[in-house]
Image: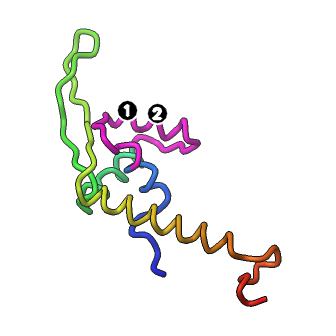
Amino acid sequence: MSLPPITHLQFLLLSLLSGFEKSGRVLRLELERNGVKKSAPAFYQLMARLETQGLAEGWYVPIEVGDQMVRERRYRLTGLGEKAINEAYEFYLRQASADSKMTPQGVPAHAT
């Protein structure tokens, strides 16, 4: 059984994008709600890597903050990102199934 194509953190981030485009600010807040704190530079570097891998798409939109126009970074999941989520999910399901077949001592039930 091979490892999933993405890390736990990438799985969480891509899952947060499932079905919705979101701003980087909103994604960072959702990560914090899930117990993950990332500095802004670390977060945007992570998102840039997801974009480079083709798992997410990002673009800028102008928004007005107070009396000033700024650019907000928005993201959406790609088809490749959805595929990676599904592969990771299947991996975790198989792992959970295999774990449930272990005895309390960690020995496969079929080996006892």
Q: Give neighbour class at mark 2: few <14, some 14-19, many 20+ (Cα, 10 Å).
A: some
Q: Give neighbour class at mark 1: few <14, some 14-19, many 20+ (Cα, 10 Å).
A: some
Q: What stretch is highlighted in magenta?
A: 15-40
At 25% from the left edge and 31% from the top edge, which residue is drawn?
Answer: 72
Question: Looking at the picture, how far across and down is residue 54, in whole percent?
Answer: 23, 59
Q: Residue furthest top?
A: 67
Q: In which quarter of the image is the C terminus?
A: bottom right
Question: Looking at the picture, how far across and down is residue 75, in whole percent?
Answer: 27, 42
Q: Do the residues labelled 2 and 1 touch (CB within 8 Å)?
A: yes
Residue 91, disc: none
> 100 or 52, which lies in front?
100
At 46% from the left edge and 33% from the top edge, which residue is drawn?
Answer: 29
Question: Looking at the picture, how far across and down is residue 89, in whole percent?
Answer: 45, 61
Three-letter amino acid code of the residue under disc 1: Arg
Three-letter amino acid code of the residue under disc 2: Leu
> 34 or 59, which lies in front?
34
Question: Looking at the picture, how far across and down is residue 10, in whole percent?
Answer: 42, 56
Q: How many labels does the image show?
A: 2
Q: Which colour scheme is used?
A: rainbow
For residue 85, what is the image quadrant?
Answer: bottom left
User: Which residue corresponds to mark 1?
Assistant: 25
For residue 105, what is the image quadrant?
Answer: bottom right
User: Which residue corresponds to mark 2?
Assistant: 29
> 91 or 77, which lies in front?
91
